[in-house]
Amino acid sequence: MAAVVAVGIFVVAYVLIASEKVNRTAVALAGAAGMVLIGAVRGRDVFFSEDTGIDWNVIFLLLGMMIIVGILRRTGVFEFVAIWAAQRARARPFRMMTLLVVITAGASALLDNVTTVLLVAPVTLLLCERLALAPVPFLLAEAMASNIGGTATLIGDPPNIIIGSRAGLTFDDFLVHLAPVVVVLVAVFVGLAWVLWGRHLRYDPERAESVMALTPRETITDPTLLRRMLVILGLVLVGFLTHNWTHLDPSLVALLGAGAAVLASRMPSEEYLAEVEWETLLFFAGLFVMVGALVHDGVITVLARELTGAIGEDYLLAAQGILLGSGILSGIVDNIPYVATMAPLVHDLVGPGNGLPPERQSLWWALALGADLGGNATAIGASANVVITGIARRNEHPISFWTFTRYGLVVTAVTIGLCVPYVWLRYFGVG
């Protein structure tokens, strides 16, 4: 009975979030409270369970990077990068979008998609302000590019970290198996960006001429702080990249970096805390609890078992079923808890990823591709989407749930559709 009520609460909350009639953070927190009150998840599990509670690694990763980005913004470096990007693209709107998409996708593979959008979004907003362009198409393109680019590596998207840990797959494994198709997907996405947004962008010659006349270096207001922050940011990135050797969680690396940034800037707490997207963090917390309740009551497990049970020993059907099923379900619930639930089932079905025959190992890669790319389907499908819509709302350029979903469904359908022949050719056709 509790499971049925929990599903009802989740559906109502999802509909309210999608309708945007009520503040989404209030809905998520109310939904989380409802799950606790009906006993779908225990109070202790909300705060301390890795499977059914708040994912503090995600929350503190976001908090740390928000503080770092907020302090970095005070140096004027975002204005510098915005002008540099505009001048490299000759202030042509779609050229700038292409440049930002490629930068976002590449950075998401080396960092993670959430950190990347935190860094790129402020640049985009300033660039669009300079050229009198609507920033929403650029922000949408960057959110989706971050999810596509993050698919390429172990650290690029949080679901990949879960899969790598459960399957025993390394950074090199992800690079070899997923990076080739991601390069193709980024190229295709640039073409999609033209169809969806680029052809509607308007070029303003006067604004463009004024931007081309600017000197980027003059925007740097505090060179000393900038040098310190670049060193700190560099060390944070090294911490992310060396996770396999240091075993420091990305959240801890981000918090250490934020502490160093606060010390280096000597900024009052009210100033750097004002840069934190508190509503976004609370929305994440509520969402994690709601989805965790579905995990706790076995709802997501039943759905996942139905998917894996229907495919039996036919590994080609299994891989394609997991790819398509993950793409659909990751758009409905955040792809992090979805993968946390699905990974043990794939492990039971084929075992650890290392040393498996290609057709069996394909299930792990299908799960990664489906979950990462399926996150583009809706505004709450991936962490990067929630962050980018939060930044847009705070800067008075709100992106509605349906605006994101209208474009996200197209991008998801095309990218996952291209992965179907890739999985077949790579692991069954010529694998």
Image: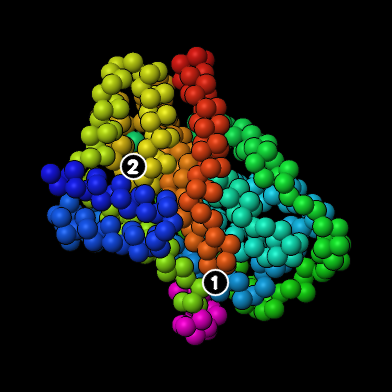
Q: Quadrant of residue 211?
A: bottom right
Residue 310: percent from the left, percent from the top?
A: 28, 21
- Left or right of 243 on screen, residue 178: right
**394 or 110, which is in the foreground?**
394
Check the image and report above or below for 310 versus 158: above
Dot 2, crowdedness within 10 Å: few (<14), some or many (≥20)? many
Answer yes or no: do the residues labelled 2 and 1 have beta carbons within 8 Å?
no
Name the kind of residue labelled 2 in the image.
Tyr
Q: Quick check: 119 left or right of 357? A: right
Give, as a single range, the part of the protein colored magenta. 258-271
Task: Return the residue at label 1.
Answer: 70
Quadrant location, the N terminus: top left
Q: Is residue 404 above or below residue 354?
A: below
In this rendering, the answer to whether 316 lies above or below 134 is above
Residue 265 located within the stretch drawn in magenta? yes
- Identify the residue at horizontal 77%, vertical 71% (top origin): 217
- Quickly name the residue at label 2: 338
User: Visible in this render: residue 291?
Assistant: no
For residue 23, above or below residue 350? below
Displayed quadrant of residue 54 = bottom left
Q: Residue at the spot x=25%, y=30% of the render? A: 305
Which of discs 2 and 1 lies nearer the camera? The answer is 2
Question: What kind of element bears circle 2?
Answer: helix
